[in-house]
Image: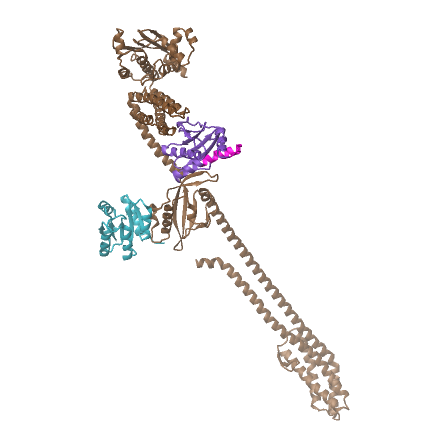
Chain colours: A brown, B cyan, C purple
Amino acid sequence: MQKFGIGKYRNIIVSVALFLLLDASVLLTNFYMSFQISEDATAVNLAGRQRMLSQRIMKSLLETDVSLFNSDARQNALDELQRSVNLFDNTLKAFKNGGVTTDANGFPVQLNPADPGKAQNALNAADEIWRPFLAGIKLLLLQGSNIDNPNFTARLQDAVQYGTANNLELLRLMNELTVALEDKATAKASRLRMIQTVGMSLAILNFLLILFHFLKQLKQSDAIIEQSRQETEEILETVNEGLFLLDEHLTIGQQYSKKLTQIFHREDIAGTSFQSLLKSLISEKDMSTAESFIKLLFKPTVNQKLIGELNPLNEIEIHIADDNGQYQSKFLNFQFSRVVVTGTISHVLATVSDITRQVMLSRDLDNARRQSESQMELLSTIMHANGDLMPMFVRNSVGSLEKINNILKLPSRSHVQHMGKVHQIYALIHGFKGEATSLGLTPFAELAHKFEDQLEALATNENLTGNDFLSLTVLLNQILRQLDAAEKLLERLAKLSQVAAQPEIAEKPDWTHFQNLADDMAQRQGKEVEIVCSGLNDYPLPAELASTVNRLCIQFIRNAISHGIETVQDRMDLQKTPRSEINIHFCRLRSGHWRLTVQDDGAGINTEQIRLKAIQSGLVTEQQSELMSQKQLIALIFSPTLSTQSAADMDAGRGMGMTVIRDLVKDQGGKINVATRAHMGSTFTITLPAATNLATQAA
Amino acid sequence: MQKLMIVDDSNVIRSKIRRSVQSERFKLVASASNGAEAITHFKATKPDVVTMDLTMPNMDGIACIEQLIRLNPDVLILVVSALSDKATGIEALEKGARGFLLKPFTEQDINAALLELTDFLYV
Amino acid sequence: MSEDKIQIFIDGVVRYFNHTPDKSVQVGTPYLAEKGKPMALDMTGLIGVSGPDKGCVYFSAPRVLLKHLLLSIGEPDTSEANLVDLVGEVANTIAGNARASLGKEFMISVPVVIEGTPSTLHLPKNSRAYVIPINWKSYTAAVAICLEEN
């Protein structure tokens, strides 16, 4: 990690070091050069002094010369000459070969030999002139100061003469030296400026490099940070779970996924406590269990893979008000896992998912399973009953129960009115119970029995109120629901049997159930019936035709037993055979049409009874009925609202049987013919189109 | 090879665990049918790993875990319980148990749990 | 839908009427509404139910009953707004009663008042609603309970 750190900052460190190095070298050069420049300045000063000294020597000589009669002045001039000559000579030597001279304050000054070239040339030339001049002056000075000494005046004259001749040249040469030295100093100064400029430029350049490098890196790392921030944001925006971090005080972190706000219908989640998030959504017990559970995750010795079973929030139902104040039930799944940073558990990551759909689905599946179980029960009930009678039973029963419901619906306030309802309902439910029993539909019979029990309780209730009927209504709903289920099952069975009937030519059907049905019904009504079938098995019948024939026969048998055939007793009184006979004959006509004939030897159709019933049920008016022919009256038996039986019992439908026949025949495009004779019986003749016709019709 | 002790009041469960564990990883050193018995065996055999039922006569699992941890804070205790109350299971872990396995379990379940427990490196 | 739960809703309405000066409230014989066909009088206060049972419960009454009810509780202003308020209040009472008796898991929404036949009613299609006539004075209102059956 540290290595990585240096690597990351290496360029910067090198750049800064280079910057410092450059600055230091510029500073050093500066220091060195300014030292040199001060040396040069001294040299220039001294060179200037040489100029002055050359003139002062001349001046001293001339003063000596004019002070012939003033010995003091003469002596002063000679002293001055002596000092000037020494200083000039020393300085000239020091300039020429390097050496020590004296500065204006009398301090020794070290001079380096002048550079070859102009300065040295000037010095050499000056030296040439100076040396004889110096010799002459030295000779002069050796003579003392006595003007009476002829040597003195002669030497003085020589020196003045030489000085006058060469003084200007010496001055010029010294001036040349000064200029040369000045030039050198100027060159040095400009070099120094250049070095400074270059150094500073380099430093600035380096600084800029550092700056740009830094900025670029900053920008890059900013971009990376921004990108990762954006990525985090995107993840949190789109993830399908509520994600958030919890610290060990169960405080929710600053960042969380958007889904979390959707699950809890709130925005202010950052920094709040986990408890406040779930407050009033889950029970206090679950809350405290959850707290302890999460705290376990902060306990390092606990193995988080081995505590999943203890999570109290793995499938928890909450009821939460949505933005419209409507309560929603949700199933949430909370998962918690440790976040480990450098070996310590820093946070617990909580993941909430809305598993409502899954839970609902599995509940639906459970329901479906339970339903299919009860359907199976119902199915076995239906299978035990006569399959063909079942749809009829369901239709009849729904009718009866709806009648019961309509009775309940009638306004009633008084005890008498309530009691009236109890009795009316009793008759209806009793009929239903009878039918269910006769068909062996035990579950329905049991429900009806329970219903009767409750009715009986109501009947003996002296303070009967509307509210007391509630249990009855609930039970009514229950029976209706069972009937709904049975109806659906029957529909599906019908479809199944259609599918099963795919091979067009069915096995020869077994018609023995006609006799069973007849026996069953007849026995309950004190009658005896013999079913005689012929022709039914003479032809290979298409499944659909067989089913139609079967259903027609069942309805005819039911109808004949309920309405046509007399009781054994009546028949004996009428001198008829006690056992009546229903003849079913089926054949194919030459035209290809099918003919079904059902003949009974019962009482025949009582047209007078039909007429009265039709008037009673509002089917026709009395006047209308008087104008009706026998044939027209007989046709009325096919209308759904007519039943000649005085009271509905468990075998007679409420006049639905003949309607069913009419509808079946109509559906097949067939015809019905009825012949009847009092005490002789009735004959129903059905003509159905040929199977091929059926097929064309279907197509 | 780690030393294992099984604590459960049902001998069916005890024998199921005994049959399930890998013999090359664990050596069964003791079985106990209640907490008090477990303490005695623990002192004598010093097991490294303990499977612990929670509801037992004569000192329940929670009290037993507390005592075992006092005797050896490093013992690896796996709670094996068919609890209806999650809070009790959490309490067992608060007392020092390291993991929890819900009854009923399969042979693979108990094996995987014990391996997870012993191979687990603390954070 | 158990009988007990239905009874709680009935009690809620009866309790409301029992707090009026005229306590002559009478419950009629409960019956079943046709599947998916809501029974509705002039004004209906509806509360949505969620939780283990889903569907709705509503109180429906003819205007004349509501006007009379307003007068009987000493409110002479029988404006439409007050009628709406009243229906909402009855629905609220039913909801409150249910909340108190059925506990938290029975979630009940804020009442909504609908005029006329509530075509927007989301009645569960697979179940028949229970309708309980509420007779008060010479008028009849009703409570309907329509919850999905599981």
Query: From the viewer's perspective, is residue A195 above or below residue A569?
Result: below
Residue C2 in view (yes/no): no
Q: Is residue A86 left or right of residue A256?
A: right
Taking the spot 67% from the left edge, 84% from the top edge, the residue there is A86
Instruction: Depth check: give the residue in front, A21 or A307.
Output: A307
Q: Quadrant of residue A195?
A: bottom right
> In the shown orientation, is residue A267 left or right of residue A200?
left
Q: Quadrant of the C terminus of chain A?
A: top left
Instruction: In the rendered view, tell whether residue B91 sits above or below residue A406.
Output: below
Front residue of A240/A151: it is A240
Q: Quadrant of residue A90?
A: bottom right
Q: Residue at x 29, y 17 (%)?
A: A507
Quarter of the image for the N terminus of chain A: give it.
Answer: bottom left
The one nearer the camera, C62 or A577, is C62
Query: x, y (%) of residue C31?
Result: 39, 27
The rendered magenta stretch, by its main secondary structure, is classed as: helix
For image coordinates 37% across by 52% down, the residue present is A298
Where residue A62 appears, x then y in whole percent? 75, 85
Question: Where does residue A94 sit, x and y in percent of width and height?
Answer: 63, 80
Total residue callouts: 0
Which residue extends farthest bottom? A148
Whether residue A38 is visible, yes or no, is yes
Question: Is A277 left or right of B39, judged from the image as shown?
Answer: right
**Residue A692 in which image quadrant:** top left
**Boundaries of the magenta span:** C75-92
- As for residue B77 lying within the magenta part, the answer is no
In the image, residue A183 above or below residue A431: below
